[in-house]
Amino acid sequence: MLPFTHAQFVAVFANYNMAVWPIQIVAYLVGAVMLALLARPRPLTGRLIGGGLAAMWLWTGIGYHWLFFAEINAAAWLFGALFVVQGLLLLLVAVVRNRLSFAASGGASALLGWGFIAYATVIYPLIGLATGHAYPGMPMFGITPCPVTIFTFGLFLLEVPQDWSLLFSGIAIVPIVLRARRVARSRALRANR
């Protein structure tokens, strides 16, 4: 049972997107730079891509979860903390210790990785628009949880085969999320009658 309605959830995105404008453009530019680095890797590629991902996770944890989503859901404090921890871990592993490497490789995992990247940056917002979630009341790339997570999975799948388990954990959670959304919509419809 969700502690908020669908309308409240969409209103959080609308308020958030209006408050942080034009950071959405900055997020897409950071994403584009990270993808360009994949095409022509340099000695600092791992640090720069890891730093970009860390910024996205930290921004989402603090900016979205703690400052906006927490208004309608107390669990956002925990979600935000998890995003902040992930962001700090990315900073530690990629930037401080220089232990992450990213490169455009071949094979099934790379193809899946590029698919995730395309989904997070282009397809995800288009599906939102097609289902009636117009800007500003929609999650945006690089600054909201789902697109950030999907984009991160995509980058990791390009070079890290052991991250395939992330895909399976994501697939396992989909039925649970869809069911929760159905229940929330049903309750919202009943409450609006």
Image (cartoon, grey):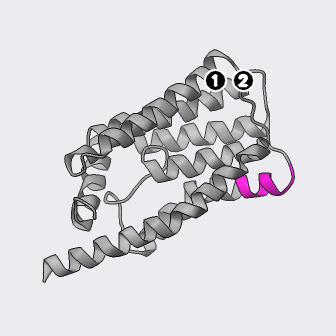
The residue lying toward the viewer, choosing from 2 and 34, is 2
Q: Residue furthest bottom?
A: 193
Is 16 magenta? The answer is no
Give the main secondary structure of the magenta stretch.
helix
Q: Quadrant of residue 8?
A: bottom left
Residue 77, position in %: x, y?
A: 30, 39
Drawn side of residue 19 relative to residue 78, left or right: left
- Region in magenta: 106-113
Give the amino acid at mark 1. Answer: Val
- Vertical arrangement, residue 146 with respect to residue 172, above or below: above
Dot 2 falls on a residue whose secondary structure is loop
- Vertical arrangement, residue 14 with respect to residue 83, above or below: below
Q: Quadrant of residue 80?
A: top left
Residue appearing at x 78%, y 53% in the figure: 109
Q: Residue furthest top?
A: 96
The residue lying toward the viewer, choosing from 96 and 16, is 96
Circle 2 crowding by C-alpha within 10 Å: few under 14, some 14–19, many from 20: few
Give the amino acid at mark 2. Answer: Arg
Residue 87, position in %: x, y?
A: 50, 31
Drawn side of residue 134 relative to residue 167, left or right: left
Dot 1 falls on a residue whose secondary structure is helix
Res. 20 in view? no
Disc ID at residue 184 = none
Q: Residue furthest right?
A: 106
Cβ atoms at labels 1 and 2 below 8 Å apart? yes
Res. 61 in view? yes
Residue appearing at x 59%, y 48% in the figure: 151
Quarter containing the C terminus: bottom left
Circle 1 crowding by C-alpha within 10 Å: few under 14, some 14–19, many from 20: some
Q: Which residue is mark 2?
A: 99
Q: Quadrant of residue 1?
A: bottom left
Disc ID at residue 93 = 1
